[in-house]
Image (cartoon, rainbow, N blue to C red):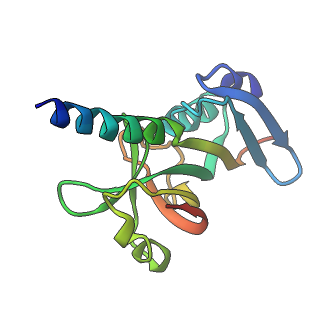
Amino acid sequence: MQQHLGRQDGVQKVEVSLLDGKVQVTLKDDGRVDPARLIKAVYDSGVTVAEMDMTARGHIVKDSSGGMVLQTQPNQSFAIVPNELSSGLESLAGTPAEITVRGQLYKKPAGKKKPDANAPLRLVILEVVKKEP
Amino acid sequence: MNTRKLALLLLLGSVIPAVSAAQIKHIEMRVEGMT
C-alpha cells in the first residue's frame, strides 16, 4: 500500500500504522493531489479505505445550484455538506478570504467493499482551523 | 481605458497568488483489511 500511494502525484511520504489501520499521507509543497486517486490506489493494493479526512486551504465559492464549495486549486474543488460549521462560512462565499478546514472527505458506505470511483467526494467540515481575511 | 487595464491587472495580481496558495495540506485515512 505504501508503494501504491507513494507513486501517486503529489505524495511525498506515507506512514502506515498497523495497530490502528491509520495511514498518514504527507503531501508535496504544491499540494496537488487527487484524493479519489489515493482511495483507488489503496483499493488496488488490496485494502479498503473506511474513512478519509483531509486538511485543506482554499476559498469558499458557490456552485451553479447555490451549494457551497471549497476551491483548493483553480481546477479542484469539493462540494461542502451543509452542517453547523459550514453555515458559519456562508458569508465568505465569493470573497478572497482563505480558510483552512479539516473535514471528512470519504466514508465507506455500509455493506460496500469497492469504492465508487464515480461518486464525487463531498467534504463534511469537522473543524475550521483558520480564517484569513 | 488605461485605468481600466491597470485596475484589471491589480485585481488579477491579488486573486492569482491567493488561488495558488490554496491547497490540500494533509490527508489521513483509516483502512480496513490490512494484515
Q: Extreme top residue here?
A: A7
In the image, taking residue A61 as reference, residue A49 lies left or right, namely right
Q: Position of residue B28 (x, y in %)?
A: 69, 48
Q: Is residue A93 above or below residue B31?
A: below
- At a point 57% along the width and 60% down the height, the residue shown is A103
Q: How many marks?
A: 0
Give the quarter of the image for residue B8. top left
In the image, taking residue B8 as reference, residue A103 lies left or right, namely right
The answer to whether any part of residue A39 appears in the image is yes
In the image, taking residue A31 as reference, residue A59 lies left or right, namely left
- At a point 16% along the width and 36% down the height, the residue shown is B4
Q: Is residue B15 above or below residue A122?
A: above
Q: Position of residue A92 (x, y in %)?
A: 38, 65
- At a point 39% along the width and 53% down the height, the residue shown is A96
Give the quarter of the image for residue B25. top right
In the image, taking residue B1 as reference, residue B3 lies left or right, namely right
Q: Is residue A62 above or below residue A45?
A: below
Q: In the rendered image, which quarter contains the N terminus of chain A?
A: top right
- At a point 45% along the width and 57% down the height, the residue shown is A97
Q: Position of residue B1 (x, y in %)?
A: 10, 31
Q: Position of residue A27 (x, y in %)?
A: 68, 33
Q: Extreme bottom residue here?
A: A84
In the depicted view, which residue is nearer to us: A109 or A81?
A: A81
Q: Extreme right residue here?
A: A19
Give the quarter of the image for residue A6. top right
Q: Is residue A130 above or below residue A87?
A: above
The answer to whether any part of residue A107 appears in the image is no
